[in-house]
Image: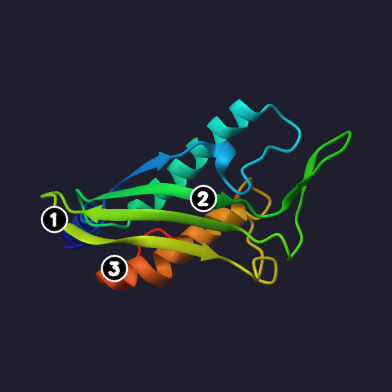
Amino acid sequence: MKVSTVLVALLAMAASAASYAGEAKIKWQDLNDYADARPSNEVKKPYHDRLMKKFDKHFNFEAQNLPEGSVFKAEITDLDLAGEVRFGMNEFRVMKPVYIPRIEFSYKLVDKDGKVLSSGDVDIKDMSYMDRMRSIHSDKEFYYDFRLISSWFQDSLYPELGIEPQKVYR
């Protein structure tokens, strides 16, 4: 009796996880044209490659909460990373409340049949990014920028679609 109860519970969990499995496809413009996608003390090309890879990975993390087979397509039109790069002998990114993270993108969410579920132009910023409780992840690169993106998904897109996210970025 216990084995069948555990088996049913595991199957139910697997079924609910399988219903969420979207993906994200992100298109980037020239990062040199963005408001602030500058590296601090490193070479620009490897930094930009890493930035795009990490942002793509984060958008895909959020897309895991979208309906199975759906694709979140976005084009990043502007990016202003949290903080500001200070120039001198050693360049570094200074985090102060006045250097807020901001991102602009247009997006289209399509289901597995190609039907548009949601679309729009987004311009988000977090003017109080340093005033919130810090997470254990707050020392990770792009933390504040990722939190901004996740907040948009959680506050705007998921409610619009009636989705209760299974995975949440903190």
The residue lying furthest to the front in this view is: 33
**Residue at the image position 46 percent from the left and 39 percent from the top:** 29
Asked if the residue at tag 1 contacts the one at tag 2, i.e. Cβ–Cβ closer than 8 Å, the answer is no
Q: Looking at the rendering, which quadrant does residue 117 occupy?
A: bottom left
User: Nearer the N terminus, badge 2 or badge 3?
Assistant: 2
Q: CA distance from mark 3 to mark 1?
A: 17 Å
The spot of residue 41 in percent (x, y) is 76, 33
Q: Please, what is the three-letter code of the amino acid marked with disc 2?
A: Asp
**Residue at the image position 57 percent from the left and 33 percent from the top:** 48
Q: Please, what is the three-letter code of the amino acid marked with disc 3?
A: Ile
Q: Residues within 10 Å of mark 3 (few under 14, many from 20)?
A: some
The residue tagged 3 is 163
The quadrant of the rendering that contains the C terminus is bottom right
Q: CA distance from mark 2 to mark 1?
A: 27 Å
**Residue at the image position 49 percent from the left and 36 percent from the top:** 53
- The foreground one among 139 and 28 is 28
The residue lying furthest to the right in this view is: 89
**Residue at the image position 29 percent from the left and 72 percent from the top:** 160
Q: Residues within 10 Å of mark 1 (few under 14, many from 20)?
A: few
The quadrant of the rendering that contains the N terminus is bottom left
User: Nearer the N terminus, badge 3 or badge 1?
Assistant: 1
**Horizontal side, residue 135 vs residue 98: left or right:** left
Vertical placement of 25 versus 98: above or below?
Answer: above
User: Nearer the N terminus, badge 2 or badge 1?
Assistant: 2
The residue tagged 2 is 78
Asked if the residue at tag 3 contacts the one at tag 2, i.e. Cβ–Cβ closer than 8 Å, the answer is no
* Count of labels in the image: 3
Q: Looking at the rendering, which quadrant does residue 31 occupy?
A: top right
The residue tagged 1 is 115
- The foreground one among 89 and 167 is 89
**Horizontal side, residue 145 vs residue 15: left or right:** right
